Amino acid sequence: MKTLKYLLTTAALGAASSAAAQDATVKIGDLTWTGARAIAHVIEAVIEGPLDGEAEIVSGLSDGSVIAAGMDKGDGSADVYTDLWMPNRQGIWDQYIDGAGTVAVNQPYPGTQQMYVPAYMADQVSSVEDLRKPEVAAMFDKDGNGKGEYWAGDAGWKSTRMWQVKFKDYGLSELWEPEILPDATFKAQLKTAIQREKPILFYYWTPEWVHAAYDLHEIEEPERYDGCEDHNLDAEDWLETSKFDCKSSDAQIYVAYSKSLEKRNPPVAKFLSQMQLDPKVVNNWILQIGRYELDPRDVAEDWVADNMDIVNSWIN
């Protein structure tokens, strides 16, 4: 016969296990760009598949600062920031990773940030020097105000401010002005411009599917030197006080996660700390989701099933 002590202990353990399982559901940020969405679904597929756990991509949890604050609290409201671009999100890094020490990161993968034109314009626009020519800027003038437009990025991105600083310090402000639009709006513009072989100048990054879909030409910028990049994009007078007159160094892109997972869900914390992403693989996920419009969950689950050797290196 089972003793009362045994029954009470079993009941307590069951209740604890139930509470832990509920607390262990991993909340993944819902960042809007395709690469972040792809990575989010792969993380969800690994947790729900090989790790036999619970995960949720929280619809609408798309503000990086809100995700970071949730990871800092460690209450399970936000656990994973899927695509942390550095140094674009230096404020998050300084506050929560180096500062509070409540957020951890994995081994990063590299990304590039450059200005591009379609390849059919490469003979006319190939460098910053070409952008200084009034006749070149005039080709990109959409509204007839005497300035050429370039897409600098979305309103919420630090890189959007970065490119405005660059154009100022390259001496281009009199000839060029930024367009600040959501990524999806820009992609529609890019598609139309390329179909019609119209001029378009824009910021973009790798990995992303546009590089597989279109033949693009990168704009050559001056080489880096000591002191060429000195900016505070969070300052009130960021444009006036910042300096950036050389090409960007490669970005380092991380998966960040709440350190509270080390206690709340140790297998997931271990997996996230050991997850190493290959830019070419990420680019392929983006291509399937962004260009071919496949369901990101299907793409992620198929990739996990076909690449268990890589997944096992992340979780074991």
Image: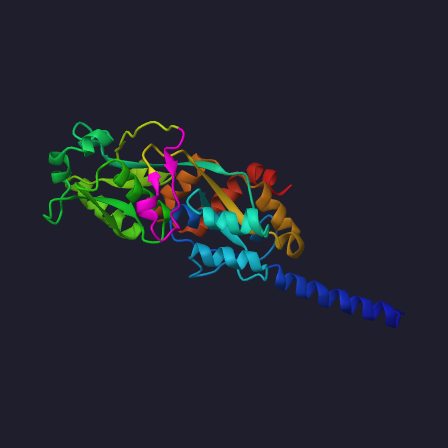
Residue situated in front as seen by the camera: 17 or 164:
164
Q: Which span of residues is magenta-colored?
A: 226-243
Say above or below: 263 vs 287: below
The image's colouring method is: rainbow
Residue 216 x %, y %: 26, 34
The quadrant of the rendering that contains the N terminus is bottom right
Q: Residue at x 56, y 49 (%)?
A: 99
Residue 231 x %, y %: 38, 42
Residue situated in front as seen by the camera: 298 or 179:
179
Residue 101 x %, y %: 59, 50
How many marks the image carries: the answer is 0
Q: Is residue 36 left or right of residue 178?
A: right
Q: Is residue 278 left or right of residue 261?
A: left
Q: Is residue 167 magenta?
A: no
Q: Is residue 292 visible?
A: no
Q: Residue at x 17, y 27 (%)?
A: 123
Is the stretch drawn in magenta largely helix, strand or loop? loop
Q: Is residue 240 magenta?
A: yes
Q: Is residue 274 left or right of residue 30?
A: right
Q: Residue at x 30, y 39 (%)?
A: 166
